[in-house]
Amino acid sequence: PRKNKVRLICLGICVLLSAHQITMAQSLEEQTVLAALALNIVRFTTWPKEAKINKTIELCVTGDNVVQQSFTSIDNKAVGDKTLHIINLSRLRNFEQCHGLYISQLNQNVLLQLLEEVKTKPLLTIGESAEFARQGGMLGLENEDGKINLYVNLTTAKAAHLDISARLLKLAKIVEE
């Protein structure tokens, strides 16, 4: 009887662990899709001269380990005649090095303060919801029933002097603050 109890407990732990791994795998898979979409968004964005982009476009990423791990799949990819470089941010400062900022899972108050701080800088901001774009982010990616929808805040993009390709805008839903 005691052996059976121990086996049952071990089996329960194994089931819990494998369920957690499945959730992690799905999360990593979804984040990898979002990273690939972020790469394409960068490819369809034009920065003003004051952004000082030479050979490398710096995309800064803030988020948990799964988010940061998923963005390694697009590090050093070609973007026209330039190369995309991923910078994982542990703190939300020093955006001068960034041409783009991917924001995942950020406290609402911190997010609003951050978006206010960078709104006129030539910094492409990408988040993970339609609400992100409505609150002043430029592009929001939202998973709705397994389909990723793109939301664009053109007012914010124009204020930062960024040009988002009409080809990308055709696929997006335009939102207002």
Image (spheres, rainbow, N blue to C red):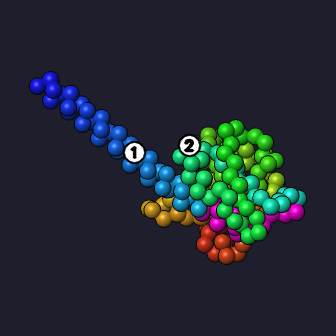
Mark 1, other Cα within 10 Å: few <14 / some 14–19 / many ≥20: few
Q: Position of residue 159 (x, y in %)?
A: 81, 59
Proximity of marks 2 and 1: CB atoms separated by less than 8 Å: no
Residue on which disc 2 sits: 65
Number of labelled discs? 2
Q: Is residue 63 visible?
A: yes
Residue on which disc 1 sits: 21
For residue 130, above or below residue 172: above
Magenta region, residue range: 37-49
For residue 2, above or below residue 117: above
Q: Position of residue 33 (x, y in %)?
A: 53, 60
User: Which residue is painted at 39% across and 45% down in the image?
Assistant: 21
* Nearest the eye: 63 or 145: 63
Tell me which amino acid carries mark 1: Gln
Of all residues, the one furthest to the front in this rendering is 76
Horizontal side of 96 relative to 28 (left or right) equals right
Q: Residue 46: within the magenta?
A: yes
Earlier along the polypeptide chain: callout 2 or callout 1? 1
User: Which residue is painted at 71% across and 40% down in the image?
Assistant: 92
Tell me which amino acid carries mark 2: Asn
Quarter of the figure with the C terminus: bottom right
Of all residues, the one furthest to the right in this rendering is 50
Q: Which mark is residue 7?
A: none
For residue 3, above or below residue 120: above
